Amino acid sequence: MQLTGPTSDETVLAELGRRLARYRLDRNLSQAELARSAGVSKRTVERLESGASSQLGNFPLILDGGPALDDAVSTIIDLTQKPLRVLRPGPISAEALAAVLERPVLAE
């Protein structure tokens, strides 16, 4: 699913959860393995993948997920604040994120 048009926080969380699950499965990781590498509980991974927001503060830990396999740097955003904020710039700019999410995203 691509986020187009006005989106609610719940829609964004649901889409991020689906993408997190797809990322994990593409790498043949269990929820427990992903949780261990990110330093969170398996239950946190379950909740994030289902779109639940009670542990939203853990999303940056999951999305960063530890060291990259190559020199690629990913864009990391903080979803716990409004407006959203780029924590680590990468190939996806704050402007591109703002255009897709149709909400302000502050650059680092």
Image (tube, helix red, strand yellow):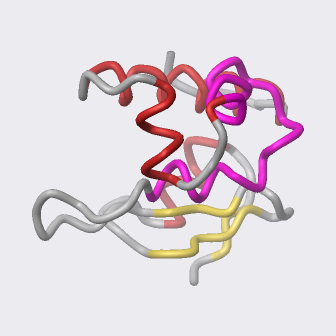
Closest to the observer: 102 or 67?
67
Residue 73 showing in the rendered view: yes
Question: Which residue is found at the position 64% from the left and 49% from the top?
Answer: 59
Question: Which residue is found at the position 81% from the left and 26% from the top?
Answer: 52
Residue 92 x/y as whole percent: 38, 59
Closest to the observer: 83 or 67?
67
Q: In which quarter of the view is residue 18 placed?
A: top right
Question: Which residue is found at the position 62% from the left and 24% from the top?
Answer: 49
- Looking at the image, is 58 positioned above or below residue 77? above
Q: In which quarter of the view is residue 5 placed?
A: top right
- Looking at the image, is 108 positioned above or below residue 6? below
Residue 77 x/y as whole percent: 59, 62
Q: Which of the image's four quarters has the C terminus? A: bottom right
Residue 4 showing in the rendered view: no
The magenta stretch is 43-64
Horizontal side, residue 29 vs residue 44: left or right: left
| Secondary structure predominantly adopted by residues drawn in magenta | helix
Closest to the observer: 15 or 67?
67
